[in-house]
Amino acid sequence: MSNRTHAAMAIWRARTIRTAGDRSFLVYMVFMVALVAIAPVGRAVWLSAVSPGGLAVLASPAAPNIAALIVAVLWACALLLGRDRGAVIRPPFLTHALATSDRPRTEAFRGPLLRSGGLVTAACTITAGFVGASLAQHALTDLLGVISFMSVGAFVGVIATVLWLAGQVFPRPAISVAVALLAFGALTAAVPGLQAFTPWGWAGLAYPSNSNPPAPVALTGLTVAVVAATPWLMSRLRLNAMTVQAARWHSATTHATGMDFGAAATIYQGRPHIRRRTRAVRLRGQLAWIFFIRDAIGATRTPGRLIVGVLALIAGGVILAFAFAPAAPGWLLGAAAGLAVFVGLGPVSDGIRHAAVVSADFPLYGISDEQLMLRHAIFPLIVTVIVLLAATVVCSLIIGTSPGAAIAGALSLGLLGLVVRIVNALKGPLPPILLTPIPTAMGDPMAAVRMAWALDGLLLAALVGTSAALAVGAPLLLLTAAGIVIGSGIFRWRSRR
């Protein structure tokens, strides 16, 4: 190792020591939240999986096809993720120092790749073991079938890691390959006879309800092949792309450490690059129509972001439909649906965030602040209601649940989810009063209060989703959630200046 590399690593260690105290609070709070939440959530998921309804889903004839589709979606997402945040990321200074040194990149950046791959592989293996154990609980498979499916989950995680790296090395072809993966994955799920000829289909053939030994063998060969190609991929990592990704990730983690998660998410928003010459503001027609056209054209200027938002809304509708199924954990699925809708509303609610910023200053458009906010809410409201209703009704008809309850839940979730987005846009900076320590016998609770303030949008979205999923059986919970969300919006609107 050269003297330049030694000096770079020494400086990086010194900076790491200085910033460790700043990041320790975020790491500690994330660990405590995960520790508190994982036990009840894991127990609810396990009880749902071993229940008659969950068993009917896991043991259905379509389960292997769905498993193959999930694997294809996972690999496509890994390719797309590598374009913005690759599997090989170090701090910006250390990235530049090691990439320009005489060390091979397979050695200099092996650690981040192993850590990223370990997390992905562990998650896939645990998920596969969870499915296999739930089937073994009802004697639908044996121990060998569970172990075989867990090995397949590990192979899927390793391949996903290499595809994550491939998306970082080849960002432009990654989009086409990801779209092809999604298309062929859907085709394989629709035509089960193609499973024997596709890698994601091999994972479906290895499902515990099937007895097909060649599937793990085929995936083993594919895993060995992609692992062998990893050094070739790492040697083609470009310095400029690595530096840009490292700087963006460092900036995002810095904002997240300061509990400014909105700014952290903004760093990864795509820049408008389509229809830049198209005039968004039309001067003719009704005022509501003018704002609708303006927001619609603005959203289509980042098509990738818009597609992700629509897919998130569809996922929220599908999850909400499953929440009304018998023996399903409605509160858990409802919370997941609320979070998905909250994420999906982001790309279509840029006008709301603009109205929140403008409303804190002098009027610019000749209309009141209230009218400005309401007119900017037209486009996201129409998109959300249409997509949510379509996804929820179609999925409820497929799985055989009540369409009426699904429609009521989708309307409630869409309306209140939009209000949550408005509340989040009116948030503003951290109030200084939350920085005041309050010593108690149990310690200082203000750290948890600040974390709750930083994540209030997600917490409100989960509350809204839970209340929408339980709207039929517990309407009082829905009214309470609506009162909390609307009350928070009124309070922040009045104190926006």
Image: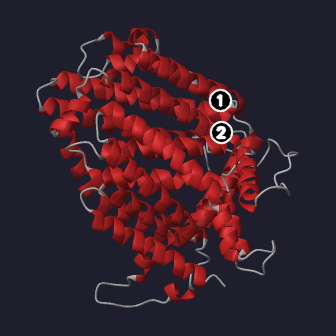
The residue depicted at 19 percent of the width and 44 percent of the height is 327
Nearer to the camera, 35 or 297: 297
Instruction: From the image, tell me which residue sits under label 2.
Output: 83
| x, y percent for residue 414 | 48, 55
Mark 2 / mark 1, whichever is N-terminal: 2
Amino acid type shown at disc 2 = Arg
Q: Which quadrant of the structure image shows residue 50?
A: top left
Marks 2/1 in contact by CB < 8 Å: the verdict is yes
The residue depicted at 62 percent of the width and 24 percent of the height is 177
Q: Which quadrant of the structure image shows residue 461?
A: bottom left
Separation of residues labelled 2 and 1 (CA atoms)? 8 Å
Q: Residue furthest left?
A: 139
Mark 2 secondary-structure assignment:
helix
Where, quadrant-wise, is the C terminus in this rendering?
Answer: bottom right
Mark 1 secondary-structure assignment:
helix
Instruction: Mark yes or no: residue 6 visible.
Output: no
Q: Indicate which disc residue 174 carries.
A: 1
Graded by Cα atoms within 10 Å as few (under 14), some (14 to 19) or many (20 or more), the crowding at tag 2 reads many
| x, y percent for residue 123 | 38, 40
Instruction: Mark yes or no: residue 50 visible.
Output: yes
Amino acid type shown at disc 1 = Ala
The residue depicted at 45 percent of the width and 16 percent of the height is 188
The colour scheme of the drawn protein is: secondary structure
Vertical side of 395 occupied by 421: above or below: below
Where, quadrant-wise, is the N terminus in this rendering?
Answer: top right
| x, y percent for residue 74 | 48, 33
| x, y percent for residue 167 | 63, 33
Total numbered labels:
2
Vertical side of 71 occupied by 442: above or below: below
